[in-house]
Image (cartoon, helix red, strand yellow):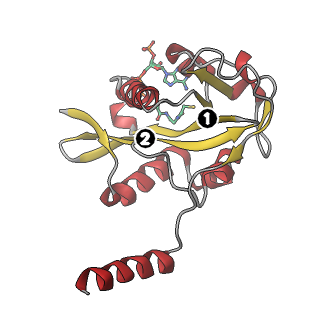
């Protein structure tokens, strides 16, 4: 049975393998990647689709801002080629958007195929005054207001504002410090 759940640390290897499969390693060159690299995704908004323990889909949302608007950037979204057309992508998106809405987020943006994303309410018209920090195709820059009018005054270049991912050595030092504190 296909289920949607939050991503765990143990999923990272399989998730990255799926993304390499679907987008190739050139995915790391995308402008959106500049808004994601070195950042921690929004809490509770990294989702996995799995079928009997096998990872078959992924989506993550990231904190960004444009002018005074705090928003989310959605992507990458990918579904294993063997499972396409079975609503896995739709379930990932709808679950992520519901969770984002419940968390009080106001708006979501992404770069993707409008013919796919329009079914969830994403559109280009709210994004006309918004730019990304690198090359992008304007017809693929899409936005969805979770709160009516969220994009109304948003203009300018999107910035990454998510928490910075600690370096592996810093993360290890933090774990060690916690172990020492707990042992004391
Ligand atoms: C796009 C993607 C995530 C959709 O996942 P999925 O689980 O197959 O999607 P769903 O089953 O929820 O929806 C299938 C519908 O979306 C349509 N669809 C899929 N990809 C599409 C696209 N790029 N453009 C327009 N429509 C698309 C299908 O034709 C189908 O239409 P129907 O409902 O009228 O039959 C998946 O095809 C994928 O991983 N593609 C490669 C990576 C990618 O393009 N990711 C992001 C999109 S920019």
Q: Secondary structure at mark 2?
A: loop
For disc 2, the marked residue is 45
Quarter of the image for the N terminus: give it. Answer: top left
Circle 2 Cα neighbour tier, 10 Å, few/some/many (<14 / 14–19 / ≥20) = many
Apparent side of residue 95 relative to residue 4 in the rendered image (left or right): right
Discs 1, 2 touching: Cβ within 8 Å: no
Q: Measured along the vertical axis of the image, is residue 87 above or below residue 25?
A: above
**Separation of marks 1 and 2 at Cα, in angstroms:** 13 Å
Q: Which mark is residue 5?
A: none
Residue located 59% across and 21% down the image? 144
Q: Measured along the vertical axis of the image, is residue 171 above or below residue 69?
A: below
Q: Quadrant of residue 152?
A: top right
User: Which numbered disc, 1 or 2, marks the residue closer to the eye?
Assistant: 1
Residue located 69% across and 27% down the image? 140
Quarter of the image for the C terminus: give it. Answer: bottom left
Apparent side of residue 156 relative to residue 108 in the rendered image (left or right): right
Residue 126 placed where, x, y %? 71, 19
Q: Measured along the vertical axis of the image, is residue 158 above or below residue 21?
A: above
Q: Mark 1 or 2 closer to N-term? A: 2
Q: Nearer the viewer, residue 175 or 6?
A: 175
Q: How many marks?
A: 2
Q: Quadrant of residue 51?
A: top left
Q: Nearer the viewer, residue 84 or 122?
A: 122
Q: Nearer the viewer, residue 178 or 107?
A: 178
Residue 68 placed where, x, y %? 73, 35
Circle 1 Cα neighbour tier, 10 Å, few/some/many (<14 / 14–19 / ≥20) = many
Residue 108 placed where, x, y %? 58, 29
For disc 1, the marked residue is 71
Residue 173 placed where, x, y %? 44, 82
Residue located 45% across and 74% down the image? 171
């Amino acid at each position: 049975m296909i289920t949607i759940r939050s991503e765990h640390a143990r999923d990272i290897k399989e998730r990255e393998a799926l993304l390499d499969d679907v987008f190739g390693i050139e995915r790391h060159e995308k402008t959106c990647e500049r808004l994601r690299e070195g950042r921690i995704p929004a809490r509770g908004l990294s989702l996995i689709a799995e079928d009997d323990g096998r990872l078959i889909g992924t989506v993550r949302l990231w904190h960004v801002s444009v002018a005074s608007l705090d928003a989310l950037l959605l992507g990458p979204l990918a579904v294993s080629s063997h499972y396409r057309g079975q609503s896995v992508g739709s379930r990932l998106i709808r679950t992520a958007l519901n969770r984002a809405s419940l968390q009080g987020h106001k708006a979501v943006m992404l770069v993707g195929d409008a013919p796919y994303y329009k079914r969830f309410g994403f559109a280009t018209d709210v994004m006309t005054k918004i730019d990304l920090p690198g090359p992008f195709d304007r017809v693929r820059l899409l936005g969805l207001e979770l709160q009516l009018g969220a994009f109304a005054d948003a203009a300018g270049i999107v910035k990454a504002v998510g928490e910075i991912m600690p370096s592996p050595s810093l993360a290890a030092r933090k774990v060690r410090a916690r172990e020492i504190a707990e042992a004391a």
